[in-house]
Image: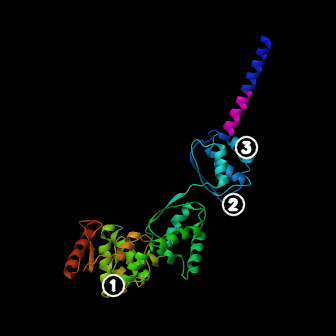
């Protein structure tokens, strides 16, 4: 009896060891940590199965077990394109299921004060599957469907801010997010302020971009600057805004040159309708992508009597305001002297 019990115990132990061995292998294969390093994997719409495995390979410890799990879960026939984050501790099962379900990770997009929508597209598409040419063509089509000329006329729909999008975002999906934001911005209260301003929405956007560029994005001067330009507009004076001269030069060069650091007298002669030194009135459209604060500044412009402003060399980034010709001339001379002393050209 004792001998039989011993044999039974040995056999049981062997079975347990075998079961444990295969159980461990099963667990390790399907649920164990198989990540060698963290990172992102990009899977295009036209990717094939082998390309997916090749993309995943640098991130896993055991490529063969990944392949086995992927084949058993039919990844070859069912995968979603996207940008997928591989993190420490993930198993083959989690990785495969993530790609099958399309649980991709969004990326951060910063929309800055781009002078041109096409400049924005060039930056945005560095983080999308679609290339800049196709992206631009799609936005051109959207613009034309709205009765506009091209994507450049969509500028008012965009706001400076940080946004999250998927790598696979389409131009249509991209624009729809901003169009919805545009609609949400124009609340009944803001529409009422728009009516009281006496300005068209196009003029409000154009002024807001001038205010943004003149202020350098600093909110504490925006309402003062907005009030000044509205004063000039109501008096029938030229707005004489340097950023519009810079924009006119960039536009003439198809935005292929860097913005000038200093505006000279010769630059003021640019015949562009956006050049507010050459033409009376508000430009025909925005000179950059604005932020919401600049639009708010125009809608709630400060009531002042200023008609002149000049950069303050003693407080970089800010301005001196006045309604006096002689005082403005003095301020302008001080600023020009400061530019010369710094050899800014």
Q: Nearer the viewer, residue 149 or 7?
A: 7
Mark 3, residue position: 68
Q: Between marks 1 and 3, how big is the CA–CA gap?
A: 72 Å
- For residue 36, what is the image quadrant? top right
Q: Residue at x 29, y 74 (%)?
A: 224
Please determine whether, in this image, residue 67 is positioned above or below residue 148.
above
Q: SS of the residue at dot 1? A: helix
In percent of width and height, residue 303 lies at: 27, 78
* Magenta stretch in the rendered image: 17-29
Mark toward the start of the polypeptide (1 vs 3)? 3
Residue 95 image position (x, y, % from top left): 64, 47
Name which residue lies at 71% across and 30% down.
21
Residue toward you, 330 or 204: 204
Foreground mark, 1 or 2, reads 1
**SS for tag 2?**
loop
| Quadrant position of the N terminus in the picture | top right
- Residue 3 relative to residue 119: left or right: right
Q: Which residue is mark 2?
A: 46
The residue most toward the top is 2
In whole angstroms, how far apart are the C-alphas of marks 3 and 2?
A: 23 Å
The image quadrant where one finds the C terminus is bottom left
């Amino acid at each position: 009896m004792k001998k039989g019990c011993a044999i039974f115990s040995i056999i049981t132990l062997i079975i347990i060891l075998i079961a444990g061995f295969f159980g461990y292998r099963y667990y390790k294969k399907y649920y164990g940590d198989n990540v060698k390093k963290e990172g992102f994997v990009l899977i295009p719409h036209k990717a094939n199965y082998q390309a997916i495995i090749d993309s995943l390979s640098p991130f896993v410890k055991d490529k063969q077990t990944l392949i086995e799990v992927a084949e058993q879960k039919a990844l070859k026939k069912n995968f979603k394109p996207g940008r997928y984050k591989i993190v420490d501790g993930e198993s083959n099962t989690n990785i495969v299921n993530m790609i099958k379900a399309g649980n991709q990770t969004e990326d951060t997009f910063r929309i800055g004060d781009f002078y041109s929508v096409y400049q924005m597209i060039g930056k945005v598409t560095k983080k999308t599957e679609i290339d800049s040419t196709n992206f631009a063509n799609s936005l051109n089509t959207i613009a034309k469907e709205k009765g506009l000329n091209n994507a450049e006329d969509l500028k008012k729909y965009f706001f400076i801010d940080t946004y999250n999008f998927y790598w696979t975002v389409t131009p249509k999906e991209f624009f729809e997010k901003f169009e919805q934001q545009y609609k949400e911005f124009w609340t009944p209260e803001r529409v009422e302020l728009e009516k009281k301003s006496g300005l068209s929405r196009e003029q409000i956007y154009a002024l807001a971009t001038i205010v943004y560029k003149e202020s350098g994005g600093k909110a504490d001067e925006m309402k003062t600057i907005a009030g000044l330009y509205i004063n000039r507009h109501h008096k029938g004076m030229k707005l004489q805004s340097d950023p519009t001269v810079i924009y006119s030069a960039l536009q003439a060069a198809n935005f292929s040159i860097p913005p000038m650091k200093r505006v000279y007298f010769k630059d003021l002669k640019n015949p562009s309708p956006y050049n507010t030194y050459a033409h009376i009135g508000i430009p025909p459209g925005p000179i950059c992508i604005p932020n919401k604060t600049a639009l708010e500044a125009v809608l709630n412009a400060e009531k002042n009597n200023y008609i002149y402003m000049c950069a303050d060399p003693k407080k970089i980034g800010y301005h001196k305001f006045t309604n006096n010709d002689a005082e403005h001339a003095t301020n302008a001379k001080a600023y020009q002297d400061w530019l010369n002393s710094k050899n800014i050209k």
